[in-house]
Image: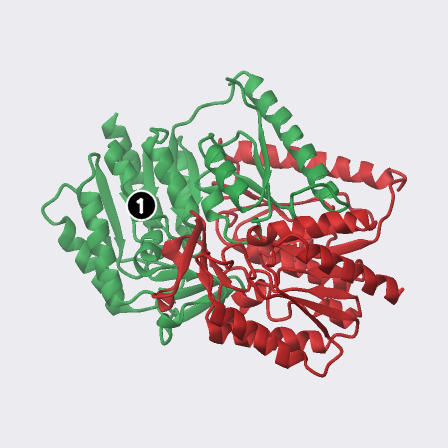
Chain colours: A red, B green
Amino acid sequence: GRLDGVLAVGGSGGTSVASRAVQALPVGVPKLLVSTMAAGDVGPYVGAVDVTLMYAVVDVAGINSLSAQVFGNATAAVAAMAREYAARRAEPAAEEHRPLVGLSMFGLTTPAVDEARAELDRLGYEALVFHATGAGGRTLEKLAADGRLVGVLDLTTTELADDLVGGVLSAGPHRLEAAGAAGIPQVVSLGALDMVNFGPRASVPAAFDGRTFVVHNPTVTLMRTTPAENAELGRRIGAKLAAARGPVTVFVPLRGVSGIDREGGPFRDEEADAALFGALREAVAGTSVELVEADAHLNDPGFARRAALRLHELVTAAR
Amino acid sequence: GRLDGVLAVGGSGGTSVASRAVQALPVGVPKLLVSTMAAGDVGPYVGAVDVTLMYAVVDVAGINSLSAQVFGNATAAVAAMAREYAARRAEPAAEEHRPLVGLSMFGLTTPAVDEARAELDRLGYEALVFHATGAGGRTLEKLAADGRLVGVLDLTTTELADDLVGGVLSAGPHRLEAAGAAGIPQVVSLGALDMVNFGPRASVPAAFDGRTFVVHNPTVTLMRTTPAENAELGRRIGAKLAAARGPVTVFVPLRGVSGIDREGGPFRDEEADAALFGALREAVAGTSVELVEADAHLNDPGFARRAALRLHELVTAAR
């Protein structure tokens, strides 16, 4: 069949139903939901694709002077996106098709990811960078599972900390499994595993009182992971990678894993980092996972470039 | 100045900044944010207006084969919405201008709100219905404060329960104050004050184990309020209304306040309802607030129609 765009309008029930349907469509097909629920947690409605949510402001039953404006904008938008999509689809696919590599990033691992992206670009890959927001990690996993990627450079595995401790940016317990299951070459690091994410400071559950926090901005609060949590993360990551069917190299940055976990930073905690590294070392000992320990910080020049080069070697050897 | 639409593209920081700017614009002006943060809690980004959020899927730095599609859709959408908005603005305002009344609703108070809406329509008003999602209540308050409404029929004051207990649909502590401060006539009821809202069942904080829950749908879980919480809500509502500068009537539905708090329903709790009604009675005793107690359920035929008629009397007398 042919489908150039979807528009759905609803309250809580309608949005729940429509979102299931549009999440099955590929990225690029316009999907616009006008919803009374679009001013809260939209995670379940968006999933891993480009769902667009317009807040309905007023109830969606009937037309009034406010909803006429909102619905007018929505219909104009979806019609234009559908025309745009149809035009893109009709274009001869003349552009170059470079092999795709997936990367994971965070604000606090950006220097590393920028360097890796430049290196991958130089090596002839197209680098797709996913924000480790839960949805980003799920999208990366989905593209790997779908066989769209020739390699994964998973520098920022922080979503596993939110899954373990209960932060708001979890990508679920199966993060870091799809590439391994699909046999896709991966180079993995430990970016931002020093933190769990919450919303505004006041929204952090009282159970975490006494922990170390950094208020990143008015809507994002970061909490330092403990040595015990980091050890468990090391074990989990090691077990996931040991189960991979493709080649895996782990790069361990011995001087810190995020912009605020370096010497002098507010999340600097050598005991916690050592627990992470030690548990990981133990979990991959005797397996086919290659471990590269570097006397460097994750964001230090050269660290991510080496990781990108190693991925290129794995991808080339796998061909 | 002239502004027909806004498009902003960003990560966590950029979205935080851009959302502040667009929240200051009136409903109807197109506001599209393409954001890596649009797959989580977007409440702080949307506020009380028609902000549209498109999930960026991949990082917003640079163009790749995925982001080209997302950004292509976004630019097409905002251009079309801006043309639509400019065309609407250029139209002579020929349509009738009926006086606006704001209503508050919830799925579980819909029968009452539908009846009230029909009655208000018959009486010559345009009824704007706001979902009590936190953002909906804030929008209702904002329109009242801006002097856009001739009256408020606040049948569904449930957001105050989320504010008190810590649910996900709070409209903040100042809900139910704007109409009173502006001297606008109000008729108020106690819709859905038997419940606090959470997301998926697994997301409910452990502190509430042992309470009564109803799983409304996969993304919405309802928790029964206790007699102590209901008494506090009665006190708060009474104090807010007693401070109003305009006329206020409260309609008390003695047989239950939501679709699941009626005889035989899972949230039926006569002790909790009695605590709510008793505390409210006490709080408005000796004030100018009119109290109407009805031996009826909120959703019973006739209850909301009487409330709408009373509002019409207050509005007419205030002219």
Chain assignment, label 1? B
| A22, above or below A185, in the image | above
Q: What residue is at 64 percent from the left and 49 percent from the top?
A: A51
Quadrant of the rendered structure where residue A75 is? Answer: top right
Q: Is residue A39 visible?
A: yes
| A4, above or below B111, in the image | above
Q: What residue is at 70 percent from the left and 63 percent from the top?
A: A141
Q: Nearer the viewer, residue B120 or A245?
A: A245
Given the current orientation, which residue lies at the most extreme left position? B286
Q: Position of residue A76 (x, y in %)?
A: 65, 32
The amino acid pointed to by label 1 is Arg
Question: Image check: B148 left or right of A239?
Answer: left
In this figure, which residue is indicated by the disc labeled 1?
Answer: B175
Given the current orientation, which residue lies at the most extreme front position? A295
Q: What residue is at 74 percent from the left and 57 percent from the top?
A: A308
Q: Nearer the viewer, residue B192 or A206?
A: A206
Q: Is residue B300 visible?
A: no
Q: Position of residue B293 (x, y in %)?
A: 22, 53
Quadrant of the rendered structure where residue A241 is? Answer: bottom right
Q: Position of residue A11 (x, y in %)?
A: 53, 50
Q: Nearer the viewer, residue B202 or B213?
A: B202
Question: Image check: B161 left or right of A288?
Answer: left
Where disc 1 sits, the SS reads: loop
Classed neighbour count for the residue bearing mark 1: other residues with Cα under 10 Å, few (<14), some (14–19), many (≥20): many
Q: Position of residue A162 (x, y in %)?
A: 52, 65
| A71, above or below A137, in the image | above
Quadrant of the rendered structure where residue B30 is? Answer: top right
Q: Nearer the viewer, residue A254 or B156?
A: A254
Given the current orientation, which residue lies at the most extreme bottom position? A286
Q: What residue is at 33 percent from the left and 54 percent from the top?
A: B163
| B7, above or below A161, in the image | above
Question: Image check: A106 left or right of A200?
Answer: right
